[in-house]
């Protein structure tokens, strides 16, 4: 079974090498995915590190994405964002039905295994330096441990469509939060010091079935029949500039999830996940149709060139475009078919 991951790695005090920028790319089935993250101008001015992070994992026909924005006001926020994005994608791929072909009985399903976090991140990787920034394309044989003995243990049916994706992503957020608490405790810190938002997306590349979840600011956007649509509207505080985080005590009260039905998966051609450093520049005009223009333009640009070149171009654009009042870290993951 093919497994793949890319993006930012979990940090430790003895390995605190969160780079100023990162970009990744890959393809699975008919889908291409690109991810890029770059440090904001305000962070550069103040000699502070990048607090955004993202991770992308693939297992079988499933693709999982995690995007997180570390709060600049929290001392360990970049540790939190890296861990949250990585652990969420791992748990999103835990317990999902993976299709296997049986020559005698036709199709059957098994339960996916979860990458163990005892080593917390892959160590085998290659780096490709091309153009602007560094492309990190990870490929590794993960140590896997079966977490379920059978599909029936979780009451799953022998079909991805019957699988309760909303319940699944909620459980993945809960497991990721618990894991983050243990991580903070291991480092001798309170979890609130790791303050970060968290966005997650799980897609079946064969059926088009998908689910998304979000706590805090940022944006999950889709291009559906050429029309830009916000796929998940997460609650936000009334206080200007404030956001909810996965590390606060009552975080589950502000978690928003949505199952994107696979009735007409062919109409949803592009998905975007981004932190507020990009989202704030796409939501508010002028012009009044800035969101539609932005989504269409990015979709067109990402399809024009080979995937590696597009990843470099995405990172270059995030690092260089200018918008009034835009000084935060910028992270964007694009999935298209």
Image (spheres, rainbow, N blue to C red):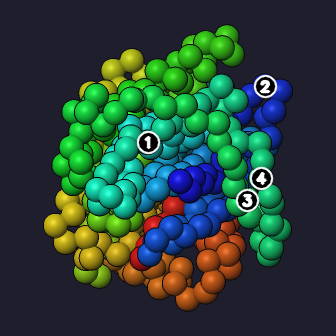
> Which label is found at residue 230?
none
Q: Quadrant of residue 161?
A: bottom left
Name the spot of residue 289 as percent of width and height, x first.
31, 77
| Residue 19 in the figure: left or right of residue 287 | right
Q: CA distance from mark 1 to mark 2?
A: 32 Å
Mark 2, Cα crowd under 10 Å, few <14 / some 14-19 / many 20+, is few
Q: Position of residue 6 (x, y in %)?
A: 63, 54
Residue 244 seen in this snapshot: no
Q: Please tell me which of labels 2 and 4 falls first in the chain.
A: 2
Give the distance between the C-alpha atoms of the residues marked 3 and 1, in whole angstroms.
25 Å
Direction from residue 170 to residue 336 in the image, left or right: right
Q: Which residue is mark 4?
A: 125
State the CA–CA distance, disc 2 to disc 4.
21 Å
Q: Earlier in the sequence, mark 3 or mark 2?
A: 2
Question: For numbered disc 2, what is the local secondary structure?
Answer: loop
Task: Give the vertical position of 325 relative to 298 (above or below).
Answer: above
Q: Which residue is mark 2?
A: 13
Location of the C terminus by quadrant is bottom left
């Amino acid at each position: 079974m093919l497994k793949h991951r890319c993006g930012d790695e979990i940090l430790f005090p003895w390995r605190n090498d969160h780079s100023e920028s990162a970009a990744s790319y890959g393809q699975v089935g008919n889908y291409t995915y690109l991810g890029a993250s770059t440090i904001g101008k305000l962070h550069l001015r103040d000699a502070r590190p990048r607090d955004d992070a993202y991770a992308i994992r693939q297992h079988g026909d499933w693709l999982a994405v995690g995007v997180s924005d570390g709060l600049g006001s929290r001392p360990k926020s970049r540790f939190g964002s890296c861990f949250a994005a990585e652990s969420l994608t791992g748990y999103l791929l835990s317990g999902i039905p993976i299709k296997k072909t049986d020559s005698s009985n036709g199709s059957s399903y098994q339960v996916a295994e979860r990458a163990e976090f005892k080593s917390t991140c892959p160590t085998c990787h290659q780096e490709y330096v091309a153009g602007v920034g560094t492309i990190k394309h990870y490929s590794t044989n993960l140590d896997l441990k079966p977490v379920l003995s059978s599909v029936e243990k979780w009451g799953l049916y022998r079909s991805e469509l019957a699988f309760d994706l909303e319940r699944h992503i909620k459980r993945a957020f809960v497991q990721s939060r618990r894991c983050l608490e243990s991580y903070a405790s291991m480092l001798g810190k309170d979890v609130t010091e790791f303050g970060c938002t968290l966005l997650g997306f799980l897609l079946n590349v064969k059926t088009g079935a998908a689910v998304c979840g979000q706590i805090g600011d940022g944006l999950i956007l889709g291009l559906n029949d050429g029309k830009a649509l916000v796929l998940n509207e997460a609650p936000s505080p009334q206080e200007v500039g404030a956001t909810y985080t996965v590390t606060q005590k009552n975080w589950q009260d502000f978690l928003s999830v949505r199952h994107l039905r696979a009735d007409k998966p062919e109409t949803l051609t592009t998905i975007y996940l981004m932190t507020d450093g990009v989202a704030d520049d796409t939501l508010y005009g002028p012009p009044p149709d800035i969101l539609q223009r932005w989504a269409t333009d990015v979709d067109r640009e990402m399809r024009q060139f080979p995937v590696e070149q597009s990843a470099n171009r995405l990172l270059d654009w995030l690092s260089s475009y200018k918008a009034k009042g835009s000084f935060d870290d910028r992270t964007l993951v694009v999935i298209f078919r």
